Image (tube, rainbow, N blue to C red):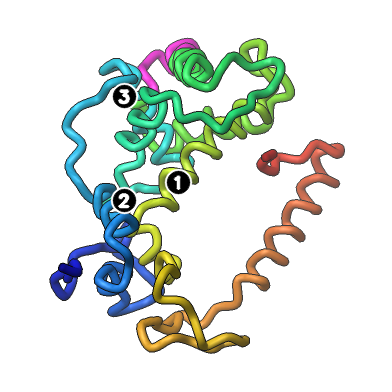
Amino acid sequence: MPLRPPSRHAVTPGDHGRFPEFDVLDEVHRWDDVTAGVVLARLGSYADFSFFSPSEQATADALLDQLLAQRDEPKVPVLPMLDRRLALGETDGWRFEDMPDDPEAWRVTLAALEEDAHTRLGRSFHQLGWEQQGRLVQAVNESSTWHGMEGSHVWSLWTRYACAAFYSHPWAWNEIGFSGPAYPRGYKALGVDQREAWETSDHEGTDPVVWEERRSQALEIHTRTSGGKSSSSHE
């Protein structure tokens, strides 16, 4: 029997979506049962942690909030999804030469971030204010070498796992207006600014290309004024 969701049962992170009245889970009845089961499982409760220790959980939770700019509820529960992935050994299948395997790399880098917090500010990372946390995290991105590892490699580890978890969750799909798995429903409204019946237009009407141009210009100015050192993310 096909799954039929209630009228609204997904939210938008931070409750500030650009696609009003859009809920990707309104379409769950169109997905095959296996796909629906996988997606709906991401909405379940996450009571148990299998990989991170309690202290690591506190550090990782604050770090992930920084990386994803999740300051307000509701938040996508990234930490439990990351914990489960690492516990099961579901890595990307590769690593940088100067980094240990991903599960160990997470433990090592969280410990290093905690060390920086205590050394520089005398408190645990999760106890710091938002701006203080941000400066410590940004320092990693801008460091050529950080605790014996290349800063860009640490940044890649953190952002790869954070973004993979965040954008696998239906709440994040609501935020970007993604209408979910195409199989077996498919698409027929192909073309620029064409929408299916279940899709909603962006109520802000802003062009992301313009914002990317502004970001690139700001990065170019920063690179020139900082002697050629760029603070951009390295993937």
Seen from the viewer's position, the closer of residues 17 and 224 is 17
What secondary structure is marked by label 3?
A: helix
| Badge 3 amino acid | Gln
Residue that numbered label 1 is attached to: 68
Q: Residue at x 69, y 43 (%)?
A: 232
> Of callouts 2 and 3, which one flags the residue occurring earlier in the amino acid sequence?
2
Residue that numbered label 3 is attached to: 57
Residue 189 in the figure: left or right of residue 146: left
Seen from the viewer's position, the closer of residues 229 and 27 is 27
Q: Residue at x 35, y 19 (%)?
A: 56
| Cβ–Cβ under 8 Å for marks 2 and 3 | no
Q: Is residue 86 above or below residue 174?
A: above
For label 2, count other residues whose C-alpha is less than 10 Å away and answer few (under 14), some (14-19) or many (20+). few
Where in the figure is residue 207, as x and y percent of width and height? 60, 77
For label 1, count other residues whose C-alpha is less than 10 Å away and answer few (under 14), some (14-19) or many (20+). some
Q: Is residue 29 above or below residue 98?
A: below
| Cβ–Cβ under 8 Å for marks 1 and 3 | no
Residue 38 disc label: 2
Where in the figure is residue 208, as x and y percent of width and height? 60, 71
> Of callouts 2 and 1, which one flags the residue occurring earlier in the amino acid sequence?
2
